[in-house]
Amino acid sequence: MSQKSVKKDLDFDYKYGFAMPERSVHKTRTGLNVGIVEEISKVKDEAKWMHDFRLKSLATFFAKPLPEWGAELGGIDFDALTYYLKATDKQSTKWEDLPKEIKDTYDKIGVPEAEKKFLAGVSAQYESEVVYESVNKELTKLGVIFCDMDTAVKKYPDLVKEYFGKLIPPNDNKFAALNSAVWSGGSFVYVPKGVEVKLPLQAYFRINAEAFGQFERTLIIAEEGSSVHYIEGCTAPVYTTDSLHSAVVEIYVKKNARVRYTTVQNWSKNVYNLVTKRARAEENAVMEWIDCNIGSKVTMKYPAVYLAGPGAHGEVLSIAYAGAGQHQDAGAKMIHLASNTTSRVISKSISKDGGRTSYRGLVHVASGAKNCSSSVVCDALLLDEKSRSDTYPTMRVNEPETTIEHEATVEKVGAEKLFYLMSRGISESDARGLLVNGFIEPIVKEIPLEYSIELNRLMNLEMKDSIG
Amino acid sequence: MRFSDISQDKKTHYSLKQNEEACFFMLNRTGQVTFELNAPGAKATILSLFLANEDGHALSVTQKHSAQKTTSHFVGKALVGGTARFNYEGLISIEEKANGSDASQECRNLILSENAGAIAKPALEIKTDEVRCHHAATTSTLSKEATFFAESRGLNESEARGLLVAGFVKSVLEKIPETFSKERTAIEEEVMKKLTKLSL
């Protein structure tokens, strides 16, 4: 495929896609049935294989029960949801129409004006397009493909077909099946052999508001010796009335390649966030998940790395914060399938005002995978007596030559530390903010600067609100 | 302070009186065992050793704290050799009222053969903030460096492995309080007898 044609293909959706009136605003009826899925596929004008894939997934979704473990999911009414909403519909939102609480938060954490508008979904298309164009010019030169998933299915069917739904098949779990049936939006990233993408790819460089869709589908392929950093989401609350977000993210990290995937999730507090994320790391590849969960009502998310090639390394660094009415059930899965593979998980969780955080993790060492090592460290901070913290790790080892370590501690904000800071003239809420930020610091430092500053401010803000 | 060897017990629930201190020991015990810390100031030390050469075994230990200022420490070590599989599930549950509790759980599995396997699931459920709570779990095989060192001192391979394994189990037995040294000696003899049957 020539670089010129890649460029032209990428332009397609943005230049013309939105202009077609029958595609610009489209919303399905509430509820889920074969008709709705057919409708989504028709609106997207999809090839038969994708159409069939969706219908098969729908049948799987109906057949599978809700998970019996983990967070309480009884509150989801699948019939009351809208499964497909064309993005441009959302963009008619006006800044003034946003709830005051969200506007205040934007102001408090100091999101720049332009970004504010974008995050609220009210940004003028033209401005974002300019940013996207310039970033894309650089990428195209390198042969990197970075576009939304819908475009990828149309323009690179062979590439997509080879990988799509292979790592997370629809029958993996109920929500993966749901996503497979009604998915829309998400990103497609293809990095050719030996290419190092220096700039982090951010979903919001793409003008497509579908980046924040309910059922987004992301596929990243890093060919041999390449490296890429992908950033999803933003630290400001995404305003949405939808109550279910269920994404699927599949990542292929080939020999000697390196992929880092950073998520800063701050959905509004009425959202069920049920996400399946999985990466496959080949020989000497490195896969890193950096996962920050601050928003949502319920999150169930366990980024996984299948260490399939010898010498592969997997890493999950996560922060979970649960305030009143929130349950963050997050964790990590490390599946050691080959020899000399290593993994590391660091999880930091904070519970406040009756919130509940749970770490749920799995480390599996297959028989014959020699000389593997894994280390899991979970630290939980409880800020008051109403809150709750759980740790549910599983270590399954079928091979003697391994070293598997797991460690967890639960503590409260130390009274002595608070007292010391306050004796230096710092107010109680500031002191708490300082201590909490210190607690999450080892992970925050792995996040790009602009995000970590926002995250720190957000944490301070959450602490302040608690004092009143 | 009281000491009970509950290896052969049929009872599955144990509770302590106010401010009582107790040490429980289990050798090759399976099934579900619950320790209720429902009287203020109660302190429990729970020790478990598991030596297996074949078959699948499962042990599940719950440390339930429902009263203030209660303490429980669990140390469980398992030697899994031959074709054996060992499944350990632990739970520390600290209820809302159990302020000032201190609980820990330590689980060490040593896998001695290609065909052996172990699963460890140490869980924590903490519902109040005035606590100290910690757990750790490791699964590994005998360290190559340690066996090499012992061999360089003139021991043959099986002697070296035997020595390291004995050290592994003794570290649990040493936690039985000194006042019960008679019981400890008896238990140690029994453990060593079992150890000789284990194929290293």
Image: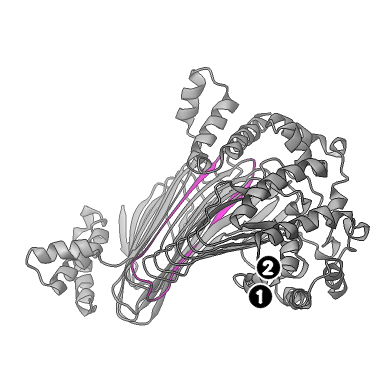
Q: Which residue is mark 1?
A: A171
- Image quadrant containing the C terminus of chain A: top right
Q: Quadrant of residue B132?
A: top left
In the rendered view, does A386 fall on the left or right side of A44?
A: left
Q: Secondary structure at mark 2?
A: helix
Query: Tags 2 and 1 in contact by the CB under 8 Å rule?
Result: yes
Please report the residue visible at 54 percent of the width from the left and 27 percent of the height from the top: A431
Amino acid at pointer 1? Asn
The residue that disc 2 covers is A176
Give SS at disc 1.
helix
Name the residue nearer the viewer: A432 or A170: A170
Would residue B26 be counted in the magenta stretch? no
Q: Which residues are magenta?
A: A353-382
| Chain bearing mark 2 | A
Which circle marks residue A408 in the picture? Answer: none
Quadrant placement of the N terminus of chain A: bottom right
Q: Chain of mark 1?
A: A
Quadrant in which residue A59 is drawn: bottom right
Q: In screen coordinates, is A208 left or right of B133?
A: right
**Residue A73 appears in the figure:** no
Q: Position of residue B104 (x, y in %)?
A: 40, 52
Where is residue A428 drawn, in percent x and y? 57, 25
Outermost residue toward the right? A21
Q: Hey, which quadrant is residue B31 in on the image?
A: bottom left
Is disc 1 surrounded by few (<14), some (14 to 19) or many (20+) residues within 10 Å? many
Cα–Cα span, label 2 and label 1: 7 Å
